[in-house]
Image: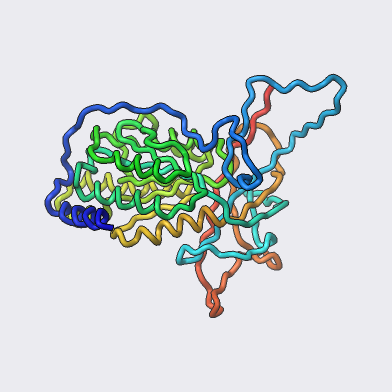
Amino acid sequence: MKSLRVLFALTVLSLVAAPFFFAQDGPNTSKSETVARPRKKGDSSTPAEAEQPKIPSKFSKKEQVPEGAPTFSTDATTVTVDVSVLDNKDHFIPKIPQSYFRILEDNVPQQVTSMNLGEAPMTVALVVEFSNKFQSYYSATWGQTLTAAYGFVQTLKPEDYLAVIAYDIKPEILSDFSTNRQDAEEALSRLRIPAFSEANLFDSLVYTAERMQDIEGRKAILVLTSGIDTFSKITFDKTRRSLQEAGVPIYAISLMQAIRIIFESRMGESNRMDFLQADNQLRTFAKETGGMSFFPRFDGEFPGIFRAISDSLRNQYVLTYTPSNQARDGKFRKIKVDLIDPATGEPLKVMDEKKKPIKYQVIAKPGYKAPRSVE
């Protein structure tokens, strides 16, 4: 608690004392190219670990089938969609029957074949912007970055997997996926002096999403960022497509909202436009991947944000359907999940305990990439 009070005091002090838009480059640091995975090939599991996220086994050679043995194969494709339904306070809405869900694939209604509901462990990559552009040592943004990162780690359950990735000119895996919180704490303790003034958000998100796309179970990327991309090799449009195809939800927390308001009168028009574009980019990534975006002005908003992320990820309706379009063309299929009244087909009206209508949102991935036939 004492260290946390000191951190908050330094954060408040730096609002006045620390420079805002100017920082100096530091020395280069070594970067890890390790591929992050929550499970390694060959790990054994017990029935109690059945709910833990797993990596599907990959074989370099096809399994040998005895001559004359019966075989079974199918060309049918099954799609699984994780859906969260949250009220206007970002609380999960339970006990919704399967018949109230409607799935449209490319605007064609699909038959939901099964639905499961439960609380499952999460696999989360905490992606932290740590650039000399904004996170100079003991600056306000440096303090807010660490406050948010440490705060999120403390909300995780023992069975949740977490990796910590920091990025500036390129992403660096500070700790691989693990349930050991000490790994994450040690990783975050290394966030002291940024090395570069670049903040390549697009490259870092694609890098992380591509390495998580084969992980089973409930997974997400939580990115703490200003939202500004300075020098990525991947363009914004290509980043959008890559994130959609990877199918990993993006939960974005924008940094510096309060500081931007304080310094708005001293910012030039180009700086204001950069930050507005950054906010729109975060909203786009979150919406198109089935995640959420947050723009807190005060650190006191973080607990509510972390609860909303947990409710969205941990408590989900898992819907399964066999698409009517079974073409193996490798094309992207758009998905839309709605709640309807099965008697009328109209949008469902949700009431609270006092029979008053409430607004709600349905969070699901926007689509998937169909498999491609191997000729």
- x 54%, y 36%: residue: 39
- Is 143 situated above or below 61? below
Residue 294 quadrant: bottom left
- Relative depth, front residue between 366 and 250: 250
- x 25%, y 53%: residue: 3
- Relative depth, front residue between 185 and 244: 185
Residue 308 quadrant: bottom left
Q: Residue furthest right?
A: 68
- x 85%, y 19%: residue: 67
Residue 170 quadrant: top left
The answer to whether any part of residue 74 appears in the image is yes
For the N terminus, the quadrant is bottom left
- x 61%, y 45%: residue: 49
- Relative depth, front residue between 269 and 182: 182
The answer to whether any part of residue 106 appears in the image is no
For the C terminus, the quadrant is top right
